[in-house]
Image (tube, rainbow, N blue to C red):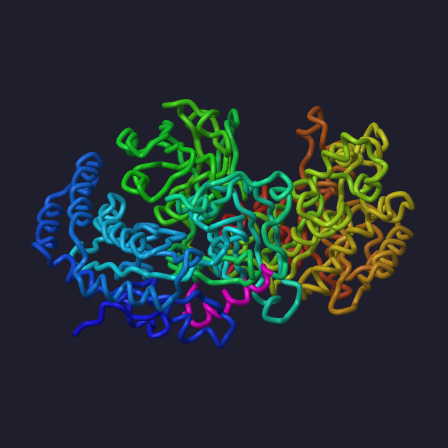
Amino acid sequence: MNPYIIPFEKLKSKDIEIVGGKNASIGEMISTLSNLGVTVPGGFATTSYAYRDFLAQENLSGRIAEALGSLDVDDVERLAAVGKQIRGWILSSPFPKRLRDEVLAAFRKMGSGSEFAVAVRSSATAEDLPEASFAGQQETFLNVRGEERLLASMHEVYASLFNDRAIAYRVHNNFDHNAVALSVGVQHMVRSDLGAAGVMFTLDTDSGFRDVVFLTSSYGLGETVVQGAVNPDEFYVYKPSLRAGRRSILRKNLGQKALKMVYGEPGTQERVRTVDVPAEDRQRFSIDEADIVELSKQALVIEEHYGTPMDIEWGKDGESGKIYILQARPETVQSRAGRTIQRFTLKSRSTLLVSGRSIGQRIGAGHARIIRDVKEMSRVRAGDVLVADMTDPDWEPVMKRAAAIVTNRGGRTCHAAIIARELGIPAVVGCVTATQAIRENQAVTVSCAEGDTGHVYDGMLDYDQRSIELDSLPPIPVKIAMNVGNPDRAFEFAGLPNNGVGLARLEFIINRMIGVHPRALLEFDKQSPELKETISQQIAGYADPVSFYVDKLAEGVAQIAAAFAPETVIVRLSDFKSNEYANLIGGKGYEPHEENPMLGFRGAARYIDKVFRPCFELECRALKCVRDEMGLTNVQIMVPFVRTLAEAKAVTQLLSDNGLKRGENGLQHIMMCELPTNAVLAERYLEYFDGMSIGSNDMTQLALGLDRDSGVVAKLFDERDDAVKALMAMAIKACKAQGKYVGICGQGPSDHPELARWLVEQGITSLSLNPDTVVETWMFLANEAAAAR
């Protein structure tokens, strides 16, 4: 006799046909990974035999097949009617006595009493496969107490195999309805209603970068994260550092976490309810660093066991403090991506309507459809932009019609984000005010091609789209590195052919991720009450103002370094001008007014200045953390705007005094060659540095005596001028004579392929280009090399 009930600990991955992908995975982890530190709540699963015997009653399976036989699932109104009819048949059909008796017996073995609660989950036999996720297709019921509520929840789970979204998904993915059976998982509840919960992936969900664990977390039960009802905290953990026992958290983003799902009031029929999160809890991370590391370690064990990137749900019990893995499935989008990438670039911008978290690195445009209820879905036509407070699986039948998706709520692992990735369309989630800021039928452009923040612009904007075959690029006679200022895009850029990063700008990281003048943080207690409040909001989640500055700076550098490891990442120390520093929060009180900041208080002169030196030492602390604590020794340091040999000596000594000594642990000091003096006296500057990187922008400005910020003389600015080329040639020759690194990180080679060719002819080691010009310049140089042969 075929079994109706199987305890989780007796299940393995091979049992998918009996208990579905989700329950088979839970059993596999309990039976094989518990001794490796993976903690999974126990319970039992009903089998596909039980489900098929249930459908055999009164020819229920035959009636369902007939109802679905000629159904057009793109007719959402007809789909809704047929789905409702089938679910009604299932809910009105009683469970066979044997199934009822065996379920209740297994439930009684798990526990008893009014406080005993379980989660009742669905697990389809075609679910959680590497080629199809079926994410959220069927129902889950949390905080289920008592035998009758257990049976009622099971009935609902059976019926949910024929939700509108599940029917449509099977048709769109060519699954036979009759071939899919349903198992019910009954699992001990984790008291994450008193703690936290979320989702983690063992790769970056947008770029497919494999060396990180991407983790989301929010207070309360995890359904709010999965559904996209909250904007959760987000964390990146670097796998190589984690395996080595080093500091491994690359990045922390504080989410709004406005809501949380908790248990319903005792004595009521309410299983769960959603409540507001107190303001003070929103301003701190929902889990601590120890939790992040523990979760990531379990994720690595799971990924190694399954041999594929994984999508994992987890919960932290607020009573015991223990971390639990609730379920794990193969990640089904990025893990199947090939070596062809799609590049999207906006040709222009217009009025910005709203911003949020970008999903998918694509651009889409269309007319907005503001959908506030699932009943309105039929209004979405092919090519529309779907705008909603949030989406859930009921919306999936029409989501594939959309050119893009925009939501008020949700993070990068919410339902809208998962489906957008699977469908290959852009989505901007967590916009807060999208349904108010965007008008019905308004023409909009949704851009996810500008970094971690996605933008929705007014009107249909023009954009470029092209495919790049990464494995077909021919060899070239020079190393190609990249200029990367935005850590959010580092994982994406690392997928391009490259020899590392020739320029990572600290000021970009300070501006994007910190936004506060370092002296205002060092002297926080001296600020006005209003400024203190502004800074306090900016540093939320971090121990103190100075730790915030050091940690965020380290996060930005580490994310770029990890993305490109083991290739070299040359980090240029901050090169803000006084007017740029003044624009940071609290900056106006600390910066001088200069008529021409471009030629003023910047670069090495700042670092050795007694007033600014404490700020510079914070940069040193961050870089030392990245290299020494995280082990990212591919980071090398570059000093900008060195006016004299005395400055060169002083700044390299200052770096050494702050634990960044040249030659220790492979550390190189490189200088920007951007003043004529640097080229003229290159041999002497190289006594203090291990190489030079030509900054063609400032070199052109100073060689030709023009202000590159002035529109009046902008037409005279040309890096190809003979005087500029003569200075660059001097620097290249000096570095080559001493066997030292010489590259270029200015704009010139990105804008002018013929200048890139000339630099190669001079023997330059490396060209550091803007990422959007890498492939074009690569192909230009390859064609030049082929013609020369």
The answer to whether residue 718 is left or right of residue 99 is right
The answer to whether residue 111 is left or right of residue 640 is left
Position of residue 499 measured from the top left corner of the image (x, y, whole percent): 59, 60
The answer to whether residue 197 is left or right of residue 690 is left
Q: Residue at x 84, y 56 (%)?
A: 685
Query: Is residue 308 found inside the magenta-colored segment of the image?
Result: yes
Which of 62 and 141 lies nearest the eye of the viewer? 141
Span shown in magenta = 291-309
Q: Residue at x 11, y 53 (%)?
A: 60
The secondary structure that dominates the magenta segment is: helix
Which of 192 and 345 lies nearest the eye of the viewer? 192
- In the picture, the quarter occupied by the N terminus is bottom left
Decide if residue 704 is in sight here: no
The answer to whether residue 469 is left or right of residue 250 is left
Position of residue 98 measured from the top left corner of the image (x, y, whole percent): 19, 65
Decide if residue 607 is in sight here: yes
Query: Where is 562 relative to 397, above or below?
Result: below
Q: Residue at x 43, y 34 (%)?
A: 389
Query: Where is 45 relative to 376, above or below?
Result: below
Which of 481 and 357 lies nearest the eye of the viewer? 357
Q: Quadrant of residue 40?
A: bottom left
The total of numbered circles placed on residues is 0
Which of 567 and 558 lies nearest the eye of the viewer? 558
